[in-house]
Image (tube, helix red, strand yellow):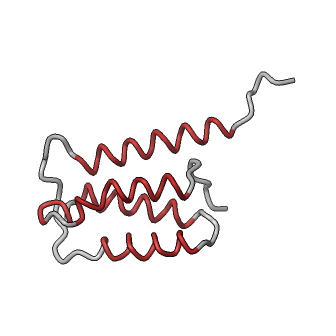
Amino acid sequence: MQEKRMGADLPLVAATWMALQPLVGEEKCSGCECLQGALVELRLTLDELPEAPERARLLADIGAAMQVGAPHACLGCEPCNPGNILADFSRQQQAQASAAQPCCDAG
């Protein structure tokens, strides 16, 4: 049985992708494990969403950004923009999942 990930929707994934796009074009960031990890998380989230043209476009765009020539370890940048963007994404995912859960005290 496949484990269900925290709730997310296409607009949240799209907004997170838009926030990451400037980093994809930066030489020091494009191959960084921090950015690549964020991109993997978005791909995994998209895999769980229903088929839609926007989902397919995001999968293609993110997949292209994941094709880097020389991946490298974290450079220790402060702040770590990809890490901060991924943390925001995770917090918003968690908030959406919590909002979708019925209260346990009902009844």
Which residue appears at 42% of the width and 77% of the height? 60
**Image quarter (top left, top right, bottom left or bottom right) of the N terminus:** bottom right
Which residue appears at 59% of the width and 48% of the height? 7
Q: Quadrant of residue 74?
A: bottom left
57 sits to left or right of 33: right
Whole-percent x and y of residue 105?
Answer: 78, 22
Which residue appears at 45% of the width and 59% of the height? 14
> Relative to 24, is 63 above or below?
below
> Relative to 65, is 100 above or below?
above
**Closest to the observer: 4 or 82?**
82
Q: Quadrant of residue 101?
A: top right
**Closest to the observer: 95 or 4?**
95
**Image quarter (top left, top right, bottom left or bottom right) of the C terminus:** top right
> Relative to 100, is 73 above or below?
below
Whole-percent x and y of residue 35?
Answer: 27, 58
How many numbered circles are shown?
0
32 sits to left or right of 49: left
7 sits to left or right of 86: right
Q: Residue furthest right?
A: 107
Whole-percent x and y of residue 20?
Answer: 31, 57
Which residue appears at 33% of the width and 58% of the height? 37
Whole-percent x and y of residue 85?
Answer: 33, 47
> Relative to 64, is 24 above or below?
above
Q: Quadrant of residue 2?
A: bottom right
